[in-house]
Amino acid sequence: MKVLLGVGGSEDSIRAVERTVSRAAAAGDELTVAIVENDDADRTREEVEARVEEILADAGVEAEIRHLEGDPGSRLVDTAEEEDFEQIVIGGGQTSPMGKINLGSISEFVLLNSHVTVSLVR
Amino acid sequence: MSESRRYPEEIAGPFEAPPFAFEDREGREIEIRPHDGSDEEFEALVEMYTAFDPADRAQGIPPGQERRIRDWLDNILAEGCLNVIAWDGEDAAGHATLVPDGDASELAIFVLQAYQEAGIGTYLMEVLLGHGAENDVEKVWLTVERWNRAAVGLYKKMGFETSDSESFELEMTLRLSDG
């Protein structure tokens, strides 16, 4: 399957990378990792890219890594639709101290606007 | 999560501190007390959350399976958290909690379905905030699903104000004391 994985650098997005890469290794997915701007995340784009490369190398999975500039949600949706991706994968939300799951604004935009199937990784 | 939440200037309250006993609208004698740290109370809460209607879950809590319920309770009943429980005799009817988050606390409240719409939630909130104030909790925040008008109404009544309405969930904050 042709999968577009959106990563902003938050904890849940890194977990999504780990899970999606190991799934790609097992299922032979054609994976593209799109690094997007997430103001709420602590990591810089360079740190995110380094972490993604590390996870890919550990799993022995090849994937294109690209940087999407501009509004992260709309750029992910546009890219997926223009390039005929079959699925968008993104992090499944942050967990509060209480244990409540909170969806970020990127997830919300992608869920509500994408015509391509969306997976949230928990 | 955003660390720069806006809080109301004014201090809310005063609120009733625990213990607090009352008769609910169904004529049941309910007493709200701080969690005493005992295994008996822990097990009573496990029983309450095991019986909890999944339709009343919000943002993934309470969790659905007993193992996950126990892990979650370990986390929110830990040292530093403030918990009050509404008792109907030996049975836990409701539970409200303040979990520390930096210089503020996150709040959540749960009332078992059989005890809902009997006025217990209002008193639980009141007494939890009273318990928080007597323990010098300064700032409280919560998130609530925006369609949950009953809950939003209750929080507003207590003095919570909306601090962020741009996410999926509504974020509300309250100032409880000078610390």
Image: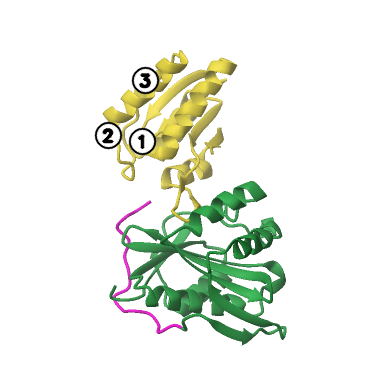
**Magenta segment:** B1-15
Mark 1 residue element? loop
Write down the residue under mark 2. A44
* Residue B172, x across and y down, in percent: 42, 66
Q: Tell which of A55 and B171 is nearer to you.
A: A55
Q: What's the residue type where badge 3 is placed?
A: Glu
Q: Which chain is green?
A: B
- The residue at 47%/44% (across/down) is A93
Q: What's the residue type where badge 2 is placed?
A: Thr
Sort mark 2 into few (<14), some (14-19) or many (20+) by Cα contacts within 10 Å: some
- The residue at 56%/25% (across/down) is A86
* Residue B23, x across and y down, in percent: 65, 86
CA distance separating discs 3 and 1: 13 Å
Q: Tell which of A104 and B122 is nearer to you.
A: B122
- The residue at 35%/34% (across/down) is A36
* Residue A51, x across and y down, in percent: 35, 26
**Residue A115 visible from this viewpoint:** no
For residue A87, what is the image quadrant? Answer: top right
